[in-house]
Amino acid sequence: MDIDRRRLIALSALSGAVPAATVVAPAVAAPLSTFGIDATTLGVRAGGGAEQTNMLQAAIDRTAGARVPLVLGPGEYRTGTLRLPSGAQILGVRGATRLVYTRGPALIAARGTEHVTLAGLVIDGGGRPMSEHGALIHLAQGRGIRVTDCEIVDSGGSGLLLEGIEGIVSGNTIANVAEVAIFSRDAHGLVIERNAVRRAGNGGILVHRSSKGDDGTLVIDNRIEDVSNTRGGSGQYGNAINVFRAAGVIVRGNRISRASFSAVRGNAASNIQICGNTATDIGEVAIYSEFDFEGAVIASNAVDGAALGISVVNFNEGGRLAAVQGNLIRNLKPKRPAGTDPDDAAGIGIVVEADASVTGNVIENAPNAGINIGWGSYLRDVSVVGNVVRSARFGITVSAAPGAGTAIVSGNLIAGSARGAIVGMDHAKPVTGDLIHEPARLAHVQISGNRVR
């Protein structure tokens, strides 16, 4: 069967009233499709200023039923909520096909659908207010979902809200959103890749679950800039990437600039991998693994400018088991942002508490400490080996409080530490001299082979 015949059959499936001559090839309008139906043949035309919700919905339903794409040409289409059935594919001309939100809980919504595609569209919220949990695109309980090469802009709520989704969100630009750029909850095999997020009110990319469980979302090669914290709080908002209760998530190769709180924040996120990311000008902890988690790999990241570089903590809440390896951390800030506890530590390169290996990291310009091991009695089985710490007030600090567990500090190079290379602490208070000169003083800490200058 040749291409022309296939197109004729697809069009005939829509309605006998639509002539075969109206089928258009996608060379310009639909780069991701081999064929499509020109929306003008179904009565949908750009411009005019009138809302076209009903006509667009009818065109979507008819093309989805025939399993062929609906191709929207350049121009502006004003619409309320459009609901996508299974098989719906809406394709536009990148940067030129603009759907403008007028009313409703979302501009595009779907629930319980499969094989839905949105590509080459500008989804424009016009800055109109939305409900507290509203988003311009809201997709729920779907499989085979594709949102690619779209622009999602000027949302009075969030940009893209995904619930129980399996699919790919790739190559999109999300800009000027009041809440969260991309929010996924309870995903099943989701890939969030190569998106650009610019100016989000309370979060960049969020991967959450309703309760702790395996998730497996990939958050890779995204660019995230200027994430604010308009809701306040002490870290619930203002993170470029936030993983909450979701296990097995990989956060890799992202470029993050100017986040009010964290670049990457894992909360109760077990078996998380945070690798190869670059974070600059971060307000609080650049890379966080906190609270009830087991297993974190934090490797080969670059952090330049944050209150703390990497924090793997909350052993008191079950947070444990980490490998922190080969990270570059520099130019730390002496204070955390407004709204956090003023007694919280700042100016530290790496903080770890339990069942952790810290190896091969390089830390420079830390106003407080290069590496902090344990907090009070919350220290167990930490190995700090083969790191380089330069220009820190304290090179390495280790808990000397009653009840603190074992640690090894070996083979590190520490240069330019004004208050001591290795010092025992009771919480934030120094309680020993420089242990480089009396390495056997703390029975629970093995100190050997470190070089200080």
Image: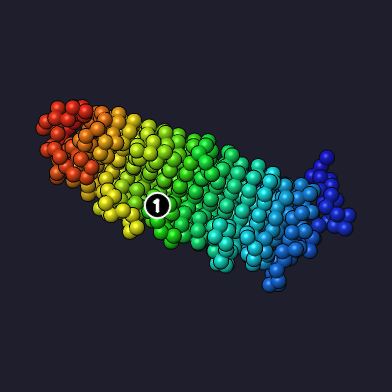
Q: Position of residue 87 (x, y in %)?
A: 73, 47
Q: Position of residue 101 (x, y in %)?
A: 63, 64
Q: In the depicted view, which residue is nearer to us: 81 or 96?
A: 81
Q: Is residue 227 above or below residue 163?
A: below
Q: Residue at x 14, y 30 (%)?
A: 441
View extreme (right): residue: 16
Quarter of the image containing the N terminus?
top right
SS assignment at label 1: loop
Q: Residue at x 33, y 54 (%)?
A: 340
Q: Position of residue 127 (x, y in %)?
A: 55, 67
In terms of image quadrants, where is residue 45? Answer: bottom right
Q: Amino acid at mark 1?
A: Gly
Q: Is residue 426 above or below residue 15?
A: above
Q: How is the image coloured?
A: rainbow
Q: Position of residue 360 (x, y in %)?
A: 30, 33
Q: Residue at x 50, y 55 (%)?
A: 180
Quarter of the image containing the C terminus?
top left
Q: Residue at x 54, y 44 (%)?
A: 210
Q: Which residue is mark 1?
A: 235
Q: Is residue 130 above or below residue 65?
A: below
**Left or right of 167 on screen, residue 234:** left
Q: In the depicted view, which residue is nearer to us: 242 or 303?
A: 242
